[in-house]
Amino acid sequence: MKCCVCGAESGRYPLCRVCNQKKEQGLIHKCPQCGQWHYVGASCPQREQPEFRYECRKSLITANEQLFFKALQELIPQGYHVFPQINLATFIERTDNAAYRNELFRNVDFLVTDAAFAPKIAIEINDPSHHDAERRKRDEKVAMICEEAGVPLVTLWTNYGVNREYIQKRITMALETPPVRVAHFKEKSAEPMENVVVPRQSWDEQAELHNETHGKKQGCYIATCVYGSYDCPQVWILRRYRDEILKKSVPGRCFVAVYYAISPTLVHVLGRNVKVREAWRGMLDGIVRRLRNRGFSDEPYLDL
């Protein structure tokens, strides 16, 4: 899809990353008069009335997604299937018979099923625009729905191209690790459901899920809270620094031990406070910037 304002490539979204930032700054809006995106104060563009209201898309997936799709087809184990652009409502159901299920009318980029077409893994391909606040909010909602349904969600970033070794490790880990369901949306009751974890914070849960998977306490709680994902470039840098530097010295190991002792409580108590997260982000952005300048890579990373 082309950006409605500048014509640049924008994936499946009406605005490209640059124009979306201008929208957040109040420079661009969706005009209430003409219904089109343009600069605030600019005259409404004249738009020719198309002959047809509907037309067929040129492709279900973008050029980047096609590269990942080809790799996934080759890397998933024999007997599994991979499908592009699958709606949540296709493989997730609501259990409360609610009349409205709008939250399920969102797509994931790919769905991996077994030979009997039972859903096993959802996969999202993220470009840098997924760091934007609105996109992060949408991504967090999808992740919570998948987690509550017991469908592991694997996130891959376009920044690093198709890293086949990394993709295969993530797929293997997701297939071999029993999913941990988290009741994000269930009302509190006196008797918790069997095998369901009562929710705390979505960022907190991502780190806890990692701990349960690896059998040790090393999930980056505060960084995951700040950046919204345990697998994103900033957190990959911090995890590399932890494993390659801090864990190799006595003072560093002491710092790591203290961090993991207090950070879950800090995130649980303060993680939903916007001002606190902004303060944390300012501090972590500075650390990440210095580590990147020192040569720490922000490519996908699996913990040691």
Image (cartoon, grey):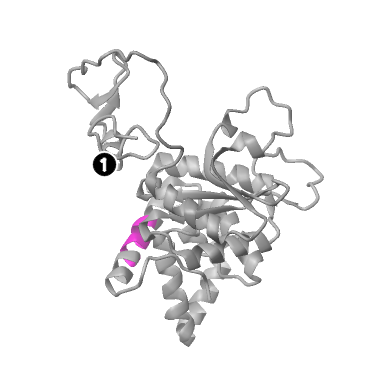
Q: Is residue 36 visible?
A: yes
Position of 183 relative to 154 (above/below):
above
Horizontal side, residue 295 vs residue 69: left or right: left
Residue 32, x across and y down, in percent: 32, 16
Res 276 seen here? no
Query: How many neighbours does mark 1 have within 10 angstroms: few (below 14), some (14-19), or many (20 or more)?
Result: few
Q: In the rendered structure, does residue 285 fall within the stretch colored magenta?
A: yes
Q: Which residue is drawn at 51% across and 52% down?
A: 270
The furthest residue to the left = 42
When the figure is inspected, residue 200 is found, relative to residue 27, above or below; the finding is: below
Pick the residue in front: 225 or 276. Answer: 225
Q: Is residue 19 above or below residue 273?
A: above
Q: Can you identify the residue that label 1 sits on?
A: 18
Relative image position of residue 181 (x, y in whole percent): 69, 51
* Main SS class of the magenta portion in the image: helix
Q: What stretch is highlighted in magenta?
A: 281-287
